[in-house]
């Protein structure tokens, strides 16, 4: 394409200068060996004639046959032919950014699947809240009943233990705080990408924005961690702030350094330079970690906000009825299939963009799917928590988190299936470790994000539920 030059252009552009707006590559296998020429290779004139004949016919008349054993010399050549194009410089990416009818059909089917799944879950939850739960609350509020103990069954009996801190609450606090930060990070990044600030034309712009926004949003993780410390009625916030600042970033950095060390040992050009690694460590230790402590100090400072919603906790824990083992992790795994089902189709496009260098530009659709994911994760956790409470099991904190976070396990399993189907039995150690390591980080990030969403929704539900009834 010939560039348009304005009169005010300060650059001296020749009339014979052109911009490349696209290219088409056609590979051929050609055997350049010769028994008559010196060194066993054709002369340059013979190579040029063979290349011209191959290009004109469109097929290689003399393909190169690789030997199974021994050494073999391979000659690589290329030829370039320029053609004038009517495509302008500003529209050179339109061919790659245009949605094909098949892609549009798949995207619409995926969006319809996500909306339908969300509506089904919303209808089931509405049935629980509007019929069963509303009927129970009307009975509890009825002043005309003479025997109150007759109606105190199910979730009403655990009112004195429902706000008891769960086991391993520091791990839950760090997980939910990190997930809240990742949720805000995803929302901000998707909005910027949807409005066009992070165009896929600029390779690496999306990853660079994530690396910049993650330290800047670290204060949110510290704030959420401190608020949960208040809810659990702990006395200090510094330990939780330190754990939040080091746990998830430390895991990501450890996997990144391990895979990068393997790339260095193989001499790969994809290895990250040492200066870039120092810059990332600076962002983590000098920007992200201090902001976590700042957010935690702000969140822990408001003493009235968190304690106001916590009900009375009995001194002696209530005995929990024995339940089926299927109501443990198998139940959480089945519940996690709901959030995963919302994003499973969109996940395929994202994996193709990451591992097959395909352009992903439908960020608006991805933002809509993420909104449906937020609703689905919250409703899933609320349903599981209510099911636990009616069984007189007050240990709802971890079920609220795991019922949504288990979708990360399904994502990791799906990524392994994707890799096996992609490689077609050709596995290499370094590439396999690289893929598994990065997909593990992505799956953990997804689990923390949806787990924090589910825990927040369940916490609001439990507070509203027990705030609406009277305690003796």
Image (cartoon, rainbow, N blue to C red):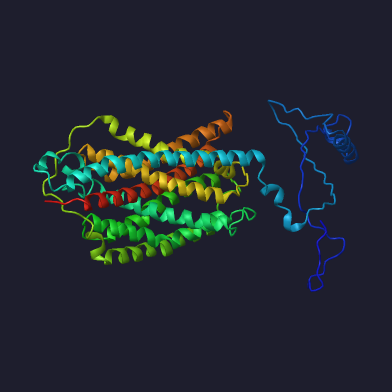
Residue closest to the far top: 68
Where residue 450 appears, as percent x and y from the top left, is 40, 46
**From the viewer's perspective, is residue 335 above or below residue 186?**
above
Where residue 130 appears, as percent x and y from the top left, is 31, 43
Q: In which quadrant of the rendered view does residue 354 lie?
A: top right
Where residue 233 appears, as percent x and y from the top left, is 21, 57
Judging depth in this view, the residue of 42 and 167 nearest the camera is 167
Specify whether residue 410 is in view: yes
Q: In which quadrant of the rendered view does residue 103 lie?
A: top right
128 relative to 137 in the view: left or right: right
Looking at the image, how many numbered discs can be counted on the residues? 0
Where residue 468 appears, as percent x and y from the top left, is 22, 52
**From the viewer's perspective, is residue 360 above or below residue 298?**
above
Q: In which quadrant of the rendered view does residue 353 lie?
A: top right
Judging depth in this view, the residue of 94 and 445 nearest the camera is 94
Judging depth in this view, the residue of 307 and 329 nearest the camera is 307
**From the viewer's perspective, is residue 239 above or below residue 98?**
below
| Residue lying at 61% horizontally and 55% vertically, measured from the top left | 199
Specify whether residue 436 is in view: no
| Residue lying at 46% horizontally and 61% vertically, measured from the top left | 283
Residue closest to the far left: 146
Judging depth in this view, the residue of 468 and 242 nearest the camera is 468
448 relative to 21 in the view: left or right: left
| Residue lying at 68% horizontally and 25% vertically, measured from the top left | 68
Task: Please state, as top left, top right, bottom left or bottom right, where the N terminus lies in the image.
Answer: bottom right
104 relative to 330 in the view: left or right: right
């Amino acid at each position: 394409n010939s560039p348009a030059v304005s009169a005010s252009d300060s650059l001296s552009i020749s009339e014979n200068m052109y911009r490349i707006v696209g290219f088409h590559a056609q590979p051929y296998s050609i055997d350049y060996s010769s028994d008559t020429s010196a060194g066993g290779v054709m002369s340059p004139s013979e190579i040029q004639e063979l290349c011209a004949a191959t290009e004109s016919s469109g097929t290689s008349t003399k393909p190169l046959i690789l030997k199974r054993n021994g050494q073999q010399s391979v000659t690589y050549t290329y030829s370039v032919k320029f053609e004038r194009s009517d495509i302008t410089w500003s529209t050179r990416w339109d061919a790659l950014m245009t949605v094909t009818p098949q892609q549009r059909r798949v995207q619409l089917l995926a969006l319809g699947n996500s909306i339908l799944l969300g509506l089904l879950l919303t209808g089931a939850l509405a049935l629980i809240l509007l019929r069963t739960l509303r009927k129970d609350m009307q009975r509890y509020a009825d002043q005309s009943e003479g025997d109150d103990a007759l109606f105190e069954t199910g979730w009403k009996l655990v009112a004195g233990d429902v706000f008891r801190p769960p086991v391993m609450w520091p791990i839950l606090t760090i997980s939910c705080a990190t997930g809240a930060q990742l949720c805000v990070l995803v929302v901000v990044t998707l909005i910027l990408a949807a409005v066009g600030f992070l165009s896929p034309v600029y390779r690496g712009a999306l990853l660079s924005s994530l690396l910049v926004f993650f330290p800047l949003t670290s204060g949110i993780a510290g704030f959420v961690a401190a608020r949960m410390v208040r809810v659990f009625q702990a006395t200090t916030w510094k330990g939780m702030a330190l754990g939040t600042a080091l746990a998830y970033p430390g895991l990501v950095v450890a996997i990144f350094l391990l895979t990068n060390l393997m790339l260095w040992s193989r001499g790969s050009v994809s290895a990250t330079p040492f200066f870039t690694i120092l810059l990332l460590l600076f962002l983590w230790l000098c920007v992200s970690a201090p902001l976590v402590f700042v957010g935690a100090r702000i969140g822990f400072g408001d003493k009235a906000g968190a304690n106001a919603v916590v009900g009375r906790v009995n001194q002696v824990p209530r005995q929990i009825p024995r339940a089926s083992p299927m109501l443990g992790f198998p139940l959480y795994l089945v519940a996690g299939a709901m959030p995963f089902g919302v994003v499973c189709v969109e996940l395929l496009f994202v994996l193709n963009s990451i591992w097959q260098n395909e352009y992903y530009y439908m960020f608006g659709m991805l933002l809509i799917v993420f909104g449906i994911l937020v609703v689905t994760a919250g409703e899933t956790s609320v349903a599981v928590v209510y099911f636990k409470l009616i069984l007189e099991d007050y240990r709802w904190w971890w079920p609220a988190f795991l019922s949504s976070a288990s979708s990360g396990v399904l994502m990791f399993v799906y990524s392994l299936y994707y890799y096996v189907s992609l490689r077609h039995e050709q596995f290499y150690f370094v590439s396999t470790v690289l893929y598994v390591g990065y997909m593990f980080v992505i799956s953990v990030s997804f689990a923390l994000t949806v787990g924090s969403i589910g825990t927040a929704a369940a916490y609001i539900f439990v507070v509203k539920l027990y705030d609406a009834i009277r305690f003796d």
